[in-house]
Each structure stands twice: as C-alpha cells, then as structure tokens.
C-alpha cells in the first residue's frame, strides 16, 4: 500500500475513540499499513500532540479487539499521530491544516495521498468538502478520498442535495459511504458463500424458498442519543441503510466475476426490482412501534417517552417491521420480512431463510415436522445453522428438528471498521454504499416517511424486553408464517441434536 495521510475530522469524538483508533491499531500490528503513514486528528478542543496521543492510547486499552500491551508497538503506532485545532466553519483553519499535512508528507517523503474521514455530524459534510476544495487540500497530485459516516441525508431530497454538493468536490469513485453492516464478517462472507458453494446457489430462489426474515434487534434503548434519534427513528437509523444493505447482499445473484462494479450493478438491480410501496399501502405492509416500560434482563426500564430528553408526546418509531417483495426472476413471490427495534428481548442480527415444505405439498407431511431453515447469524455471534427434520429414536415415529450448527470463532476476526478502513485505503469500494443504492433505498423508504408524517400508520406500543408489537407477528401470520428463532436456538430446549461444526462443510475464505 502507498503511504497516506489520514485526516480525521471529529478526532475527539466517540466514534473515533471506540472504533477508528482501535481499527487503525489492529491494522498496524497486523502489518497491513504501509511503513510510513500519518494521521492528523482535528477538533475544536485545544490539545497538545502528547495529550492527543495519550487519549488514543487510552482508547486502545479500552476498546481494542486485541490487547494493547506491547509498549513498543504502541509507541511506534502513536508516533504517526498529530493533532490540529480546526473548527469546520473557519476557513483559515484549513490553510493551517494544509501546511501541517505538507510538512508531514515532506518528512515522510510520501506522495500526497489523502484520506478525509468525516467522523462528525452530517450537518458539517458540505461545509467541510467545500473548504477542502477551496483551501487546495484536495488538489495535490496523489489520490484523495472521502469517507463519510451515516446518516446520508434525512429523506430522498436531502440525500440528493447532499450528494450533488459532495460531487462538486469528490467523484463517486472517491466517496466511501460507510455502512458498517457491510463490514461485518458474516455479511461480507455472503459473497464468498454464494460464489463458492453451488448448493447455496442452487437453492437460493423462489422455487425453494417460502420466505426470508431479516432481523436486527438491540437491547439498548435510546441512550445518550435522544436529540439525534428522536428525529430519525428506526426507519432512518437502521432500516433505510443497514437493513436494506443486508437485503441486497443476500439477494444479489453474484456473477462469477465479482468485481466492485459487478457487485454494485447487481445491488442496484435488486433495489430497482423492489416493488414500490404506495403511501396508502404502508399501513398494511409496515408495523411502526415504540417501546413502553418493561423488563430487560430482569431489570425494569422506562418507556421511550420517559427517557431523558424525549418529549412525553413523541410519536417516534423505535421499531419497524416491513414486508417487501423483489420482482425479479429469482425472488418473485418470496416475501421478505425485515424488522429492527430497540429494547428488544435479545441482541441479535440474523437472516433466517425458510424453505418451502415439500412434504406438505406432496400430501405426506407429518404435522410434527418443522420447516427447513437456513440461518446466517451476523452478530453478536457469527454462525450458520441449518435446521433439518429427523426421526427421534426415543420417541418412535415422531419427527424432531435437528440443527446443524456452525459457530465462527470470532477471537481473531477483524472487526467491521478494520475491514472497511483497510478497503478504503486500498481504494476498494465493494463494501461501501454506492450513491445509486443510497438513492434507491431512500426512494423505497420515502412513502413510509410520508405515511408516518401524516399519521396514516398507527404507532403500536410494545413492552421493553419483548419481540416487538403483536402486529409484527400478525404481519407474518396473515401469510401463514411466523418469525423463527425469536428465542435464541429455541429448539435447544427441546433437546435437539446438534451436529458438530466439522460435519458442516461450506466453503468460506478464512
Ligand atoms: P461525537 O462524539 O459527538 O463527536 C463529534 C466530533 O465532532 C467531536 O470530535 C467534535 O470535536 C467534532 N466537532 C463538532 N463540532 C465541530 C466543529 N464545529 N468543528 C470541528 N469539529 C467539530 O460524535 P460521534 O459519536 O463520534 O459521531 C460522529 C459521526 O459519526 C456522527 O455523524 C454520527 O452520526 C456518526 N456515527 C456515529 C456512530 C457511533 O457509534 N458513535 C455510529 C455511526 C455513525 P470538538 O468537540 O473537539 O470540536
């Protein structure tokens, strides 16, 4: 990799501390960074380089995936870091920054390759990029790249406006829109699994699949993010970006030649094939929920409207479940149910694929069988489960479900931010959201935003610590389905057999 300067806006913030510094450190100790690189942290706070480095060291001790216990490697790592006071609205600060970057580039004798990472509120994106342009920070001979965090817009129009402004300074190839779900190892593995396992390619279509369920549940409530979350809700915070990206990654029919362009082209095709929802139909296809007081892991918690800094009258959504249909050759007729919520019963992100019940269709199905399921556990655990039916030798004649369960050992697996930062440094945008995907996602979600705004969809309350409102179950029941795996590995309680992971062979690249 070529030498680079990593220019970090928001270097004193929470995201930098919890994710970005630990990710850079792990890349550094894995020798994935070049010999010479420099990181310039920016913020309004007055900090000496020493104090800045001490803060980073502290964040490594607290948040690094691997213990930061080698003083030499920590010192070598921290040497690359310097701090510069910058207020995003002060033009003169950008000229000061330019001088500092040029000095560092000279010291390191490196090409002016500059990655601008905006770990700041979205209200600053346009100001920063305009100033990068005006100050000449972005006009050197090396490469320049822009990494931005979500949220990318607030609705379709604001996302288009933001994109138009960014495009005046950076080309699409230079913009890396982070969706950290695309950095999660299991989501990335969906590509590998589908490309290298003909068995998966053979069954992932509407001839075999009855429905698909994608869930991302959190136990936490709104926490300290009230000001942000109360204007955003689950639909913007999770659904428009992370959930639709996971849907795309699952349903694209990967070409054997999976270049960045091909993957992005196929993702765009999926989004274009999503049947549009009309505002009038949102009520029947979408469940809008908000948590009430309840119990989380045995402890009482307050309802959303009693959270600090949330108005007692807030109608904001903390849960969404939606039914979607993809109108293409592979998926026509397969319903996709997607849900995400806060203050749910357990923390889990997973995809459940329910296969058609061929035994039922041929009239020989024993009522005690359950459907075959293929489950991709995305987080916090990572694994693949296949549920089959077998006869129980102890209960003569009865079927019982058997789960073939492969759990990935996550100890040494790079985290999402490591994967994504490394890709961006290499200029590989396969696992970043292209503008076309972002625009089409907002386009799909826009009728929901409008229906919520006009109160066409009732707000369903659910007790904290449950699986969401009852209407979320009804959404599937009306089609003859149910959410699976709401109790984690619910069938373990029924003393199901579990086959060891070495008997479950799928090809993955480790
Ligand atoms: P944060 O803790 O509030 O940090 C904000 C950063 O912005 C601070 O470093 C602050 O530095 C800087 N800043 C604020 N106003 C500034 C100004 N006028 N000029 C220069 N710097 C300024 O926020 P965060 O949690 O790190 O999140 C950063 C961004 O990532 C947000 O857009 C957020 O939506 C997004 N995001 C965060 C997470 C997460 O897990 N935290 C996840 C996904 C996306 P000073 O106070 O020193 O100026």
Image: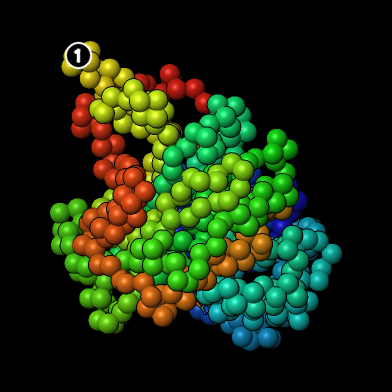
Which residue is most to the right? 141
- Name the residue beneath numbered marker 1: 396
As helix, strand or loop, the secondary structure at mark 1 comes to: loop
Q: Residue at x 22, y 68 (%)?
A: 292
Front residue of this view, candidates 323 and 499: 323
The x, y position of residue 215, in whole percent, is: 39, 50
Residue 313's image quarter? bottom left
Please determine whether, in this image, residue 104 is positioned above or below residue 252.
below
Front residue of this view, candidates 301 and 120: 301
Q: Residue at x 25, y 58 (%)?
A: 470
The count of marks equals 1
Which residue is most to the front? 363
Residue 116 visible within the image: yes
Residue 431 visible within the image: no
The x, y position of residue 199, in whole percent, is: 55, 26
Front residue of this view, candidates 152 and 111: 152
Front residue of this view, candidates 14 and 287: 287
Callout 1: few (<14), some (14-19), or many (20+) C-alpha neighbours within 10 Å? few
The x, y position of residue 166, in whole percent, is: 69, 73
């Amino acid at each position: 990799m070529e030498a680079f300067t990593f220019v970090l806006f928001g270097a004193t913030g929470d995201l930098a501390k919890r994710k970005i510094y630990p990710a850079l450190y792990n890349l550094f100790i894995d020798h994935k960074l070049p010999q010479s690189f420099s990181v310039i942290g920016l913020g309004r706070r007055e900090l000496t380089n020493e104090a800045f480095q001490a803060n980073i060291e502290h964040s490594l001790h607290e948040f690094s995936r691997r213990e930061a216990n080698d003083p030499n490697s920590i010192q070598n790592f921290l040497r690359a870091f310097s701090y510069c006071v910058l207020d995003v609205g002060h033009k003169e600060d950008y000229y000061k920054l330019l001088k500092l970057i040029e000095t560092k580039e000279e010291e390191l004798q490196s090409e002016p390759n500059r990655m601008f990472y905006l770990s700041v509120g979205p209200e600053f994106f346009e100001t920063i990029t305009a100033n990068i342009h005006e100050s000449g920070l972005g006009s050197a001979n090396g490469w320049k790249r822009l990494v931005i965090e979500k949220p990318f817009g607030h609705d379709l129009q604001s996302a288009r406006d933001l994109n138009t402004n960014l495009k005046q300074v950076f080309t699409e190839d230079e913009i890396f829109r982070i969706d950290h779900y695309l950095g999660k190892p299991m989501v990335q593995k969906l590509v590998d699994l589908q490309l290298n396992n003909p068995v998966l390619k053979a069954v992932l279509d509407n001839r075999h699949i009855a429905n698909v369920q994608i869930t991302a549940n959190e136990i936490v409530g709104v926490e300290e993010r009230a000001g942000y979350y109360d204007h955003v809700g689950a639909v913007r915070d999770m659904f428009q970006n992370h959930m639709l990206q996971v849907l795309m990654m699952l349903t694209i029919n990967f070409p054997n030649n999976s270049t960045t362009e091909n993957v992005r082209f196929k993702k765009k095709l999926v989004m274009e094939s999503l049947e549009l929802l009309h505002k009038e139909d949102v009520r029947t296809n979408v469940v809008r929920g908000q948590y009430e007081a309840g119990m989380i892991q045995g402890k009482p918690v307050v309802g959303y409207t009693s959270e600090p800094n949330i108005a007692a009258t807030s109608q904001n959504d903390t849960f969404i479940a939606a039914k979607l249909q993809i109108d293409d050759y592979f998926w026509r007729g397969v319903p996709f149910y997607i849900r995400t919520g806060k203050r749910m019963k357990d923390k889990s992100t997973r995809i459940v694929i329910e296969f058609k019940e061929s035994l039922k269709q041929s009239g020989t199905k024993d009522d005690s069988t359950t459907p075959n399921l293929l489950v991709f556990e995305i987080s916090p655990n990572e694994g693949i489960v296949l549920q089959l039916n077998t006869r129980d030798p102890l209960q003569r004649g009865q079927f019982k479900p058997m789960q073939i369960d492969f759990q990935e050992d996550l100890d040494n697996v790079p985290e999402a931010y490591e994967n994504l930062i490394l890709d961006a440094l290499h200029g590989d945008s396969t696992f970043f959201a292209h503008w076309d995907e972002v625009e089409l996602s907002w386009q799909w979600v826009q009728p929901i935003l409008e229906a919520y705004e006009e109160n066409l969809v009732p707000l369903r309350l659910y007790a904290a610590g449950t699986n969401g409102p009852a209407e979320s179950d009804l959404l599937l029941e009306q089609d003859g389905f149910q959410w699976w795996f709401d109790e984690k590995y619910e069938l373990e309680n029924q003393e199901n057999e579990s086959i060891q992971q070495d008997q479950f062979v799928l090809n993955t690249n480790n």
